[in-house]
Image: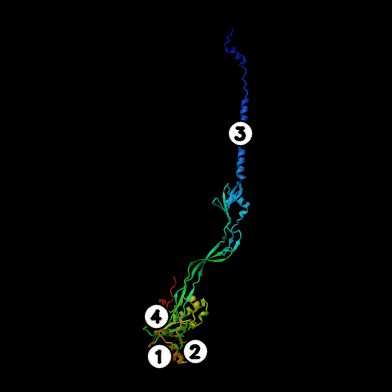
């Protein structure tokens, strides 16, 4: 008989035979998987809902911004460019493209409208990528006008000329100097507009004085025009014999023909100066012709006499403001006269003498002629004129002498040189 305590004899053993596999039903696992799927779905739905809300909030929700201190409704998806387009740039306009003189070349060719977002400037290139946020503040303004591009040039500014007349000796007190000025030429319009003065011009100042010798001097200068000629030699002989000096304003062409006479004038202690080259009215000449006439005359006399002089007596005494403007760098002085004998009219020897003595005073400059016609009257009356002046105590000197003893003339005038260039 088996012991009931053995395993095989237990009631459980009888209920679950050893050769029968135990079956486990997985119902609880299915329920767990379903729960997970539902949870994930719910999360996805919630996330999608949240994303939708976020997307709507940031793109389609309308909110208020201030544009030029006025509330404007916008959405988050609108760029600044969109807002400006929707509101026609808030009635602001781009600037104009202007010519250098301010004429409109293009009504919208200037700078675009300007936009500041919360105080920060937004460039035109940034408008399409810049978005608005609630409570943003925008300032939209008209674009600025812009001038056309241009090229920079420089030009001369002519110097002005002032002239003080009244004295018998005209001279350069201060040389003129050309200034410089910048000017612009528009690329589109071609307009020319003056701009900055880079170098100020210096005024040419012409002064004039009548010789004023020292009180202890009693001097007169006799002057002879239009030579040299066949009448010059006898006049030189008279001057030399009387111990007198004179100044000869000679024509360049005639000096070139009679160089020995020019040298004799100087050898006798007299002065030679220019009366132009061909005796034109210098005031009728243009700048180039004037300068050529003067330079040719000076050169002819200098070559003939082997001396340098820049003293001039203009034909007819005519050397006006324009002449000085055109040739002040060539002329030391222009010598007029205080006494005109009118000898060229052939008034008679006594009339010529009377004119000299009637207007005699210390520092006088007497006009006579040794050329340009028949000067027999001058030759015949000259000894009597000199004797009469000597009898009155006058010494007959050159124009150079009058200038040097005066003391009021600039050193370049006293040295018969052109004035130095202005600084």
Residue 93, how many percent across, how many down?
60, 57
Q: Residue furthest top?
A: 1
Residue 60, how many percent across, how many down?
62, 45
* Quadrant in which the N terminus appears: top right
Q: Which residue is mark 4?
A: 406
Spatial CA distance of label 4 from label 2 is: 33 Å
Q: Which residue is mark 3?
A: 40
Task: Identify the element where label 1 is drawn.
Answer: helix
Mark nearest the camera among 3 and 2 is: 3
Sort mark 4 into few (<14), some (14-19) or many (20+) by Cα contacts within 10 Å: some
Determine if residue 192 is in view: yes
Which mark identifies residue 388? 1
Q: Which residue is mark 2?
A: 345
Mark nearest the camera among 1 and 2 is: 1
Sort mark 3 into few (<14), some (14-19) or many (20+) by Cα contacts within 10 Å: few
Spatial CA distance of label 3 from label 4 is: 122 Å
Q: Earlier in the sequence, mark 1 or mark 2?
A: 2
Query: Relative to 391, is 108 on the left or the right?
Result: right
Task: Identify the element where label 4 is drawn.
Answer: helix
Q: Earlier in the sequence, mark 3 or mark 2?
A: 3
């Amino acid at each position: 008989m088996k012991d009931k305590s053995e395993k095989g004899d237990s009631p459980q053993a009888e209920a679950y035979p050893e050769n029968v596999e135990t079956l486990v039903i997985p119902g609880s696992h299915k329920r767990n998987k379903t729960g997970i799927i539902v949870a994930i779905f719910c999360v996805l739905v919630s996330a999608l809902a949240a994303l939708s809300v976020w997307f709507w909030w940031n793109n389609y929700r309308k909110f208020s911004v201030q544009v030029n201190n006025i509330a404007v409704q916008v959405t988050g998806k609108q760029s600044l460019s969109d807002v400006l387009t929707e509101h026609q740039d808030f009635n602001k306009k781009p600037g104009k493209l202007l010519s250098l003189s301010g004429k409109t070349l293009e009504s919208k060719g200037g700078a675009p409208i300007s936009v500041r977002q919360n105080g920060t400037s937004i460039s035109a290139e940034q408008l399409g990528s810049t978005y608005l946020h609630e409570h943003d503040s925008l300032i939209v303004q008209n674009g600025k006008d812009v001038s056309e591009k241009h090229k920079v040039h420089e030009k001369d500014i002519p110097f002005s000329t002032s002239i003080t007349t009244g004295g018998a000796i005209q001279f350069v007190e201060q040389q003129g100097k050309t200034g410089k000025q910048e000017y612009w030429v528009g690329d589109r319009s071609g307009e020319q507009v003056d701009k900055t003065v880079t170098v100020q011009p210096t005024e040419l100042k012409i002064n004039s004085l009548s010789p004023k010798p020292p009180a202890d001097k009693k001097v007169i200068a006799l002057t002879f025009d239009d030579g040299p000629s066949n009448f010059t030699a006898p006049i030189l002989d008279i001057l030399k014999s009387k111990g007198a000096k004179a100044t000869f304003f000679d024509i360049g062409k005639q000096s070139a023909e009679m160089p020995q006479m020019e040298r004799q004038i100087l050898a006798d202690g007299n002065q030679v100066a220019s009366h132009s080259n061909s005796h034109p009215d210098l005031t009728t000449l243009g700048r180039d012709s004037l300068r050529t006439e003067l330079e040719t005359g000076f050169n002819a006399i200098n070559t003939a006499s082997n001396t340098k002089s820049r003293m001039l007596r203009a034909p007819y005494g005519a050397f006006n403001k324009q002449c000085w403007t055109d040739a002040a760098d060539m002329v030391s002085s222009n010598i007029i006269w205080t006494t005109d004998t009118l000898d060229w009219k052939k008034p008679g020897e006594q009339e010529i003498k009377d004119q000299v003595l009637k207007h005699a005073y210390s520092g006088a400059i007497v006009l006579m002629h040794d050329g340009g016609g028949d000067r027999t009257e001058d030759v015949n009356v000259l000894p009597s004129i000199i004797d009469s002046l000597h009898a009155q105590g006058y010494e007959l000197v050159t124009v150079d002498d009058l200038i040097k003893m005066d003391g009021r003339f600039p050193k370049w005038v006293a040295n018969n040189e052109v004035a130095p260039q202005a600084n």
